[in-house]
Image (cartoon, rainbow, N blue to C red):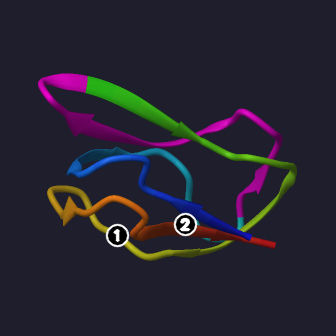
């Protein structure tokens, strides 16, 4: 399952690590958009398989941020 960016912005903090077990609604990273910090949360329980962004990356709407198995 892919976690997508809901809007364009900057990645300001990555909380999850590859291999982490996450529950639905656990915070994975923080996306700054329009001067607001938006937590990006897990849509379902799973394990973080891949993180496709780094802190300070600029992302576009619907860009893949995290892959959860």
Q: Give the range drawn in magenta.
A: 20-36
Q: In front: 69, or 59?
A: 59
Q: Position of residue 30 (x, y in %)?
A: 37, 39
- What is the quadrant of the N terminus in the image? bottom right
Question: Which residue is rendered at x = 81% and y = 39% of the image?
Answer: 24
The answer to if 47 sits in the magenta stretch is no
Q: In this view, does 7 lie to the left or right of 10?
A: right
Q: Position of residue 16 (x, y in %)?
A: 55, 52
The answer to if 22 sits in the magenta stretch is yes
Q: Distance between the residues labelled 2 and 1?
A: 8 Å
- What is the quadrant of the C terminus in the image? bottom right
Badge number at residue 38: none
Q: Disc 2 vs disc 1: Cβ atoms closer than 8 Å?
A: yes
Q: Report which residue position mark 2 lands on.
A: 66
Q: Is residue 24 left or right of residue 62?
A: right
Location of residue 15 with respect to 68 vertically, above or below:
above
Q: In front: 15, or 39?
A: 39
Mark with earlier residue (2, 1)? 1
Question: Which residue is rendered at x = 43% and y = 64% of the image?
Answer: 62
Location of residue 14 with respect to 67 vertically, above or below:
above
Location of residue 46 with respect to 36 vertically, above or below:
below
Question: Which residue is rendered at x = 45% and y = 32% of the image?
Answer: 39
Q: Is label 1 in a helix, a strand or a loop? A: loop
Q: How crowded is mark 1: few (under 14 residues within 10 Å), some or many (20 or more)?
A: some
Q: Where is residue 59 in the image (x, y as percent from the top left)?
A: 24, 62
Q: Is label 2 in a helix, a strand or a loop? A: strand
Q: Where is residue 42 in the image (x, y as percent from the top left)?
A: 68, 46
Q: Is residue 36 left or right of residue 63?
A: left
Q: Report which residue position mark 1 lands on.
A: 53
């Amino acid at each position: 399952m892919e976690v997508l960016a809901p809007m364009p912005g900057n990645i300001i903090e990555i909380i999850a690590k590859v291999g982490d077990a996450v529950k639905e609604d656990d915070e994975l990273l923080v996306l700054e958009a329009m001067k607001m910090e938006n937590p990006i949360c897990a849509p379902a329980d799973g394990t973080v398989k891949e993180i496709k962004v780094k802190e300070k990356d600029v992302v576009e709407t619907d860009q893949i941020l995290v892959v959860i198995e």
